[in-house]
Image (tube, grey):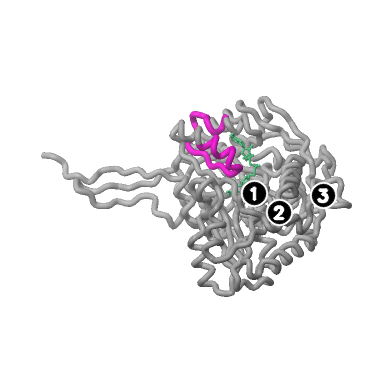
Amino acid sequence: MDSTELDRTRFYVEGQWVTPLAGDTQVSLEAATGKPLGTAALGSAADIDVAVRAAERALHGPWGSTTAAERATIMRRFAEALAARADNTSALVSRENGMPIALSHAFNGAAPAGLLQMYADTIESTPLERARPSQAGSTIVRREPVGVVGAITPWNYPQVLAMMKIAPALAAGCTVVLKPAPETALDGYVLGEAAAEAGLPPGVLNIVVAGREAGAALVSHPLVDKIAFTGSTAAGRIIGAECGRLIRRCTLELGGKSAAVVLDDADLATFVAGLGDATFQNNGQTCTAQTRVLAPRSRYSEVVDAVAQYARDMVLGNPLDPAVTCGPMASEAQLERVLGYIDLGKKSGSKLVAGGARPAGLPDGWFVEPTVFADVDNSERIAQEEIFGPVITVTPYDTDDDAVRLANDSEYGLGGSVWTSDEDRGIAVARKVRTGTIGVNYYMQDLGAPFGGMKSSGIGRELGPEALDGYLEYKSIYAGAAQAG
Ligand code: NAD
């Protein structure tokens, strides 16, 4: 595929493919080869303004008076249209950001359609209006859509992270302006095509790929009612501050530096089998990645050897090859960032036990060897800062309480795991870790349960029926009083 094959230079706004008003175009490069993959437009604040106004019109148009059942019907059609495109979408995202293809099938192919179906079912069974007795008569308690939603997403799981916002928003009756990240500028088209095919009314979903400046214009646009953001904690702080100033609702899904706690009775074969999902998922470019392995001193060298061997055995290469377990980093900037942290690790008192360099034989893409540092003090920068690549630290501990203290000795609280032969003991430890999600003997996101972070990992929850709360406002209508006279 050459640079002209994928022309993604228009935006999906108000049901039309429109030419950007201003702004740049970029040639998107394939992560595994560094070669051109397609051309994409990058929007400006002016494009965001047009999209928000379209969303606002749609909110006050026929969409605003649809029933839950009507919205559910359209959402199911949207799901079908996405499912029909799932193979192409998965492959495209893998080429953009280096995600191994099986994972991309799950998160960019299957999950978005599944989420639309799930929230279609949820909204049909959620009462949106109920009367209850009051002192004066009866009060009608209603739930109304929050309004125009600005959804801002990162490049690591572009399709599912967008749909984790779009699906509950549509179910609630909101309208949406999605701003995907420039690193994955090409796959957002699929959402527009499928929405059009499903008959989503014009303006209900609008998509403008753009950088930070236009993202900031979306955050502060006067007609936006809520911001749903997934990305770095640094950007989340800026966005949260602006939303606070504007008294604008926001959910913030931010960074992580999660711990995998290996208890002294752990079955190491189970732990090693789970490392791919828990720790190295998407080449380490996963917000919940458990990149801090905490190992009991009594079995320390066993754990270090197992993690190092796993890292050495990972198969690097083109993520479209199903045998590949570690693809490239998503961009050159991301590769430089990861290599910078590896240098930092080498200069610290930690011991490099696997990887530590770019792999020989893969000079073109943005590859880095899965890397493991042992004997890492938890206060080191490589144990405290989110690296967002396949770089793991191993730190020894003495008692379960010590392990919990180390797991919690982090600015973040997003994911985590506990590995043990005694599930009750694992659950007891899991209860003590200050984190939004944690697995016992495996880690895999459950789309049916609330997902999000504690501490600097964010505010609010996505997924599960609970996510609907972020897209609905309560209103109480005091009624039913006896008329005077
Ligand atoms: P990023 O914060 O640089 O960018 C994310 C998105 O926000 C992009 O679309 C970007 O253009 C936009 N953006 C950045 N600054 C902005 C601003 N000031 N105003 C408006 N928009 C702005 O993050 P990234 O590098 O693309 O993604 C990686 C980060 O995302 C990691 O920290 C990762 O942990 C986090 N993440 C979190 C979750 C979660 O659910 N908690 C999921 C995936 C990724």
Q: Which stretch is magenta? A: 217-240
402 over 14 or under it: above or below: below
The location of residue 417, given as percent across then percent down, is 59, 62
Residue bearing mark 1: 380
- Circle 3 sits in a helix, a strand or a loop, which is it? loop
The residue that appears at 46% across and 39% down in the rendered structure is: 249
At 67% from the left and 49% from the top, the residue drawn is 382
Query: How many other residues sit within 10 Å of disc 1, few (<14), some (14-19) or many (≥20)?
Result: some
Quick check: which quadrant has ligand 1? Answer: top right
The residue at label 3 has a CB less than 8 Å from ligand 1: no
- Mark 1 lies on a secondary structure that is loop
The three-letter amino acid code for the residue at tag 2 is: Ser
What residue sits right under mark 2 in the picture?
Answer: 350
Residue 134 screen position, x and y as percent: 23, 49
Q: Are marks 2 and 1 in contact (CB under 8 Å)?
A: yes
| Residue ranking furthest to the left | 485
In this rendering, would 33 be left or right of 239? right
Residue at horizontal 49%, vertical 38%? 226
Q: Ligand 1: does it lie within 8 Å of the C-beta at label 1?
A: no
Of badges 1 and 3, nearer the viewer stands: 1
Q: Does residue 226 show up magenta in the picture?
A: yes
| Residue type marked 1 | Glu
Residue labelled with disc 3: 358
Q: Indicate the amino acid at tag 3.
A: Arg
The CA distance from mark 2 to mark 3 is 19 Å
Q: Is residue 41 magenta?
A: no
Please name whichever residue, 298 or 322, is drawn nearer the observer in this view of the structure.
Answer: 298
Q: Looking at the image, is mark 2 or mark 3 earlier in the sequence?
A: 2
- Disc 2 crowd rating (10 Å Cα; few below 14, some 14-19, many 20+) is many
The nearer-to-camera label among 2 and 3 is 2
How far is the residue under mark 2 from the one under mark 1? 9 Å
